[in-house]
Amino acid sequence: MTVSLPSLPSSLPSDPEELSRLLGATDGLSVWPRCTRLEADGDVSVGGVSLAEATDRFGTPVYVLDEQEVRDRCRTYRTAFPEADIVYSAKTFLCRAMAEICRERHRQ
């Protein structure tokens, strides 16, 4: 799979928000996980996983999540809203591994 990217500076940012801006985001929000990196060869990686390699291996669409970031975000919601029912939208992406992560977070 070939991904067309805009012209990139010689020094690539490690910050996902800056990466999003370079990839076309204009609102200051990042759709990329914090662990997203733009590699020197133009590839994008998430949690150390090359998106080009993932699409070559599994085709598209392919979902690449960073488990630690999912766990951190679950913990953040639980801390911010300790009395609330924190739920996960199964329409977003549901597989056994994701259900297990959410169940573990619910127990804590």
Image: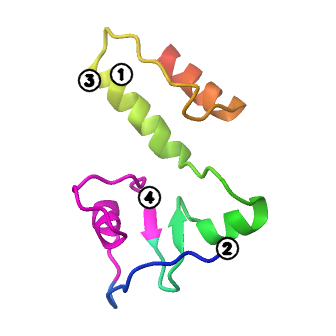
Q: What whole-number distance in Å separates the C-alpha atoms at marks 4 and 2?
A: 22 Å
Q: What whole-number distance in Å separates the C-alpha atoms at marks 3 and 4?
A: 22 Å
| SS majority, magenta | loop
User: Which residues are drawn in magenta?
Assistant: 12-37
Residue 77 vertical position relative to residue 22 in the rendered view, above or below: above
**Is the C-beta separation of discs 1 and 3 under 8 Å?**
yes
Q: Which mark is residue 35?
A: 4
Q: What amino acid type is highlighted by mark number 2?
A: Met
Q: Residue 1 carries which label?
A: 2
Q: What amino acid type is highlighted by mark number 4?
A: Cys
Is residue 8 a member of the stretch shown in magenta? no
Query: Percent position (x, y) of residue 73?
Result: 40, 36
Label 4's element? loop
Classed neighbour count for the residue bearing mark 3: other residues with Cα under 10 Å, few (<14), some (14–19), many (≥20): few
Between residue 10 and residue 80, name the one nearer to us: 10
Please give the name of the residue rendered at 31% of the width and 14% of the height, measured from the top-left corner: 82
Mark 1 or 4, nearer chain start: 4
Q: What whole-number distance in Å separates the C-alpha atoms at marks 2 and 3?
A: 40 Å
> According to the image, label 3 marks what residue?
80
Q: In which quarter of the image is residue 48?
A: bottom right
**Is the C-beta separation of discs 4 and 2 under 8 Å?**
no
Position of 66 with respect to 80 (left or right) is right
Tell me the quarter of the image containing the N terminus. Answer: bottom right
Position of 68 with respect to 90 (left or right) is left
**Is the C-beta separation of discs 1 and 4 under 8 Å?**
no
Please identify, in this view, whether the residue under mark 1 or under mark 2 is nearer the observer. 2
Q: Residue 78 carries which label?
A: 1
Please identify, in this view, whether the residue under mark 2 or under mark 3 is nearer the observer. 2
Please give the name of the residue rendered at 41% of the width and 17% of the height, measured from the top-left corner: 86
Label 3's element? helix
Classed neighbour count for the residue bearing mark 4: other residues with Cα under 10 Å, few (<14), some (14–19), many (≥20): some
Q: What amino acid type is highlighted by mark number 3?
A: Ala
